[in-house]
Image (tube, helix red, strand yellow):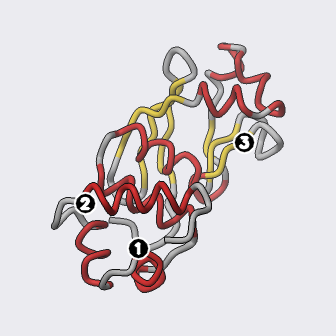
């Protein structure tokens, strides 16, 4: 699993506003960006298939860009989170959830009321994530105090 911020090592545009990305840790995934593009007015030009096909990497793999790191760019952390959510991989999704909130293993453990060891086990897929933990993560996303 990720020990630092994700970096993208390659990206290839696919059809229907999807992109195939490979990350520095060796993980690769197809990511559907259509919802993200629809939600942000500044990204609407990417609905043009010709422009979308020109995807490139930002410097150091810190994101995807279509205009040399201008407003038509998406950070690698966002791409990683979307890829993790769409992959159905619970450990990757938990890792992305921690990253989204800026949680270390200790901070996530404190927030969820469990041991740091459990958090690391969930994040590394050495133990399955219980439904109650998944629900607590969603509650935290909604702003509830757990």
Query: Count of labels shown?
Result: 3
Q: Nearer the viewer, mark 3 or mark 2?
A: 2
Image spot of residue 64 (x, y percent) = 63, 43
| Numbered disc 2: secondary structure | loop
Question: What residue is rendered at 66% in x and 55% in y?
Answer: 59
Q: Name the residue under label 1.
A: 3
Image spot of residue 124 (x, y percent) = 25, 67
- Residue contact between numbered discs 3 and 1, judged by CB atoms under 8 Å: no
Question: What residue is rendered at 65% in x and 13% in y?
Answer: 49
Please report whichever mark, 3 or 2, sits nearer to the chain's N-terminal start: 3
Question: What residue is rendered at 53% in x and 63% in y?
Answer: 140
Splitting the image into 4 quarters, where does residue 117 fall?
bottom left
| Numbered disc 3: secondary structure | strand
Question: What residue is rendered at 57% in x and 64% in y?
Answer: 144
Please report whichever mark, 2 or 1, sits nearer to the chain's N-terminal start: 1
Image position of 91 with respect to 56: above or below: below
Splitting the image into 4 quarters, where does residue 128 fall?
bottom left
Image spot of residue 36 (x, y percent) = 64, 34
| Front-lying residue, 56 or 112 | 112
Q: Which of marks 2 and 1 is in front?
A: 2
Name the mark on residue 73: 3
Q: Name the residue under label 2.
A: 129
For label 3, the crowd category at 10 Å Cα-Cα, with few meaning under 14, some 14 to 19 and many 20 or more, is many
| Front-lying residue, 42 or 28 | 42
Image position of 117 with respect to 124: above or below: below
């Amino acid at each position: 699993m990720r020990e630092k911020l994700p970096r993208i090592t390659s990206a290839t545009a696919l059809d229907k506003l999807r992109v195939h990305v490979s990350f520095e840790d060796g993980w690769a995934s197809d990511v559907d960006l259509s919802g993200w593009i629809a939600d942000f007015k500044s990204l609407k030009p990417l609905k043009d298939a010709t422009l979308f096909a020109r995807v490139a990497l930002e410097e150091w793999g810190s994101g995807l860009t279509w205009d040399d790191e201008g407003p038509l760019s998406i950070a690698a952390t966002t791409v990683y989170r979307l890829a993790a959510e769409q992959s159905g991989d619970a450990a990757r999704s938990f890792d992305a959830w921690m990253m989204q909130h800026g949680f270390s293993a200790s901070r996530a453990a404190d927030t969820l009321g469990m041991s740091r060891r459990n958090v690391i086990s969930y994040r590394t897929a050495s133990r399955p994530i219980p439904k109650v933990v998944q629900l607590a993560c969603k509650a935290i996303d909604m702003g509830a105090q757990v």
